[in-house]
Image: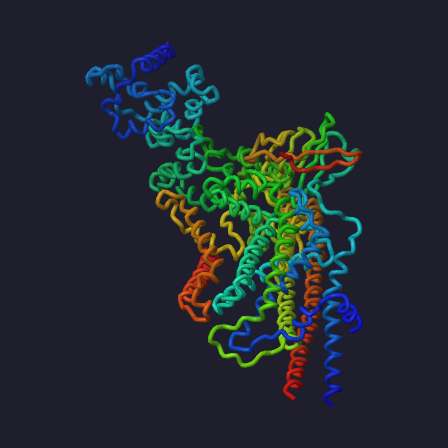
Amino acid sequence: MEFTRRKFLNLLLGITGIGTLSSMLYPLFKYITPVKGEEVLSGSVSAGKVGELKPNSAKIFKFGAKPGILILTQSGEYKAFSATCTHLNCIVQYKEDIQHIWCACHNGHYDLNGRNISGPPPKPLEEFEVMLTGDEIFIRRRQG
Amino acid sequence: MKNIFLIIISLSLYTFGSNCINCHKNDKYYMEWQESAHFNSNIECSICHNGKPVEESKEKAHLNLKKFFTKKEIVLLCGKCHEDKNFIKKFNPNLKTDQLSSYKTSKHGISLFEKNDENVATCIDCHNSHKVLKVSNPLSPVYPLKIVDTCAKCHSNKELMEKYKISGNELEDYKKSVHYDLLINKNDLSAPTCKDCHGSHGAIPPGVSSIRFVCGRCHILNQEMFEQSLHKKPWEENGFKYCEECHGNHLIEKPNDELLNPENGLCLSCHTKDDAGGKLMVHFYNELKKMENFLDENNIRAKKAEDGGIFMEETFINLQEAKAKFTKGRTMIHTFSKEKFDDILKEGFEILEKEKKIIEEGFKEISKRRKGLAIFSIFAFLLAILILLKLRDIERKKNG
Amino acid sequence: MKIFDWLKERYDLDFFIHIFKEKEVPKHKFTFFYFFGGMALFFFIIQIISGIFLLLYYQGSAEKAYESVKYIVTKVPYGWLVRSIHSWSANLMILCIFIHMFSTYFLKAYRKPRELTWITGFILLSLSLAFGFTGYLLPWNKLAFFATRVGTDMLNKIPLIGNWLSSIARGGEDVTGATLTRFFGIHVTVLPLIALGFLALHLYFIQVQGMSTPIKVKIKENMPFFPNFFLRDLFVWILSLAILAAVASLFPWELGEKADPFAPAPAGIKPEWYFLFTFQTLKLFPPHIVGFEGELVGIILFAIAGFLVFLVPFLDKKAQKDEIDKKFAIFGILALIYIILMTIYAWLD
């Protein structure tokens, strides 16, 4: 009797051991399998393609956890800023008629250099660097 | 002529020095003056008090001395320099020189100059007499954070205010408002205080028809929408005070929807519950409450999912966007158009529905992880127990 | 065992056979403490394995570090688990090392002939703290950045060579991407190689000399290492693994916010718990003591204390003769109480 019980115990031990090991190896196996598509997010973000925007218009894009605004000026220059108003954090927009960046919440105005020129905003908008590679527009934080 | 006189004094003092300090250096007022902006510009005692500071003997130095001034004299004295553009631009080319003329248009100025009423504020009541500081200096009584308490010196005195049919409650009311909260608690120096609506030197309550422009400087969309709404005509016809009619003047509450409350909303002062206006009020209220609850629920759930280890960064950004739609909805009310209101809210609800799904997926992932942990733990514990049994078995075998 | 015989014909395996057949573990009142060295080893092995997996995706530059950890934790399947295990196991490993050190201290396992085991052990403790310090910076988040800045600032206080030391540690005047790359290289190659070397020595000494028994403690019997103590060890290791899996899953390690060198330090920056007692002690020192900078005096005192602990096998003369010198136990208890109280104080501060 002792003999078969021991064998049974060893069997159980083996099965449970393999079971535990498998439940550890499974996640590791899935871990090393490459994920389709996305690469590590680098410090720069794509904000669209050249030609998407008409001159004197803008679009909002996601810059990491925060919103950004990309403007194509009348003279054909791309400018990008943080879209979070420095007053009470509303999201700003572009007003083509006066060519200002404008915040609807309390009528704050910024010029095309991001400087706060009228209304409650206490600070300028942070400006981002725009890089054109081929036909894609990349935005990244100002270096240095 | 006066210019040359002042220049000569400054120059001579610069060359020969001012002797006031010999006797007055420990005087309270002298020391206050030394901390002031006037000290830095060498505007010294004799410019206001007369006398001859180059003299060394008291009698000669105190020649023509003027110690005390009436209220009118004070205003005109300060105004003598501060309205003189050519003089002021030598010291600060950008300093405005309209204080005296503005003051004469203010309630204070009108009472003083036209009614000879001395129960008014003059320059020194707000700016101090000797310790005159720049407005941008946080210690100045007219620094944005301090203006309220400076005006309160008189305007909270109910007895004094009664004579002018002012309630004296304005400051108490203002201190309960959202503007004061932003100013003091959130350090928003652009939040309106007394001077932003009433003016500083030309202080006067805004007129009935001009209120909307004053509020509209910041709340421009609300103003524009209201002007284009069907309420503009009845408001004008009845002489209603635009924004103030619904929102009050000093006690402007933090944003909430209680003005639209179906039971006692403000609209019911003119509308009935069953007319088009009353029904619209109820619609606004119900939709806004619905969205507010949805927003809160999503935020709480997202936070919970985040605490459980799921990344909700994008969700929080989108919920902020939904909140912006909600705020825009509240602003849209001023168009009194059901269509425009519904359109904005629809956009907000769409975002909220989408995020709700994402949040629920997050919870599913948490539960999947817990299940995985449970499976592993069961295996591990079973294994541990089996090892103990094996151990017992081996040691029993040893002992025979 | 055909493979075994094949090897035996070619190599002298007596050493290993001896361990397998003859190694014994004494059973006494304090046998329980024998587990902690093994647990520390277990967690170290977990660190190596989880660390290698993290290396498959982590990128050690200031531009990519935070984003790569974010990628691991949000996009890689079970990445969140591997990372959380790595962070938790680091802390559990250091905790076990401290318990292991205190137990061997109080049980005087350092006495002759095991002095070098203590010496290599102390070095391993220092290496594990260096692992913790360098590894902490790698996610390049705000907490890590400022904790590293405060930590390396301490080096500046050392007279004459302080500034030079700190610039070597930081790869520059201040904590920058250069610091990150440096710490990454140290954490992933330099420290592991040195640690494995000393670990091999440490384990070799133990196998060759056998387990130390506390002075004047009654030994009930000796149990064979294989299979009796081994199974007990395995049992403890599996329980440790279960506990690690549970905390790593139920309390996942936070990502934090990306470090911004130009932002001001957030209020209440604290190092990890195992450095808290030194941190708090230095905070309590007055700015100047007898003309020297207060913090410098504190650092020197800690260095002296560390050096004395390092040399304890040679200082405890009575133990070398298998006699108990109560002074060392008292000093140890005071130190332990001080460390615990200071840690709690710093936590609540």
Q: Which residue is pictured at 42% across the width and 45% down the height?
A: B172
Residue A120 lies, in percent from the top left, at 55, 35
Total numbered badges shown on the rendered structure: 0
What quarter of the picture does the C terminus of chain C occupy?
bottom left
Q: Pick the quarter of the image with the N terminus of chain C.
A: bottom right
B120 vs B98, nearest the viewer? B98
Q: Can I make out residue C138 in this image?
A: yes
- Whether residue B325 is visible, yes or no, is no
Residue at left offset 67%, top offset 49% = B318
Q: Position of residue C273 (x, y in %)?
A: 52, 57
The picture places residue B119, in percent across and down from the top left corner, at 33, 32
Residue C276 is situated, as x and y percent measured from the top left of the image, at: 49, 55
Q: Is residue C96 above or below residue C283?
A: below
Which of the 4 quarters of the picture holds residue A25?
bottom right
Q: Using the image as rendered, state which of residue C178 and residue C269 is in the foreground.
A: C178
Placement of B73 over or under B241, stated as above or below: above
State the residue lying farthest toward the bottom: A1
Q: Nearer the viewer, residue B323 or B44?
A: B44
* Quadrant of the rendered image containing residue C262: top right
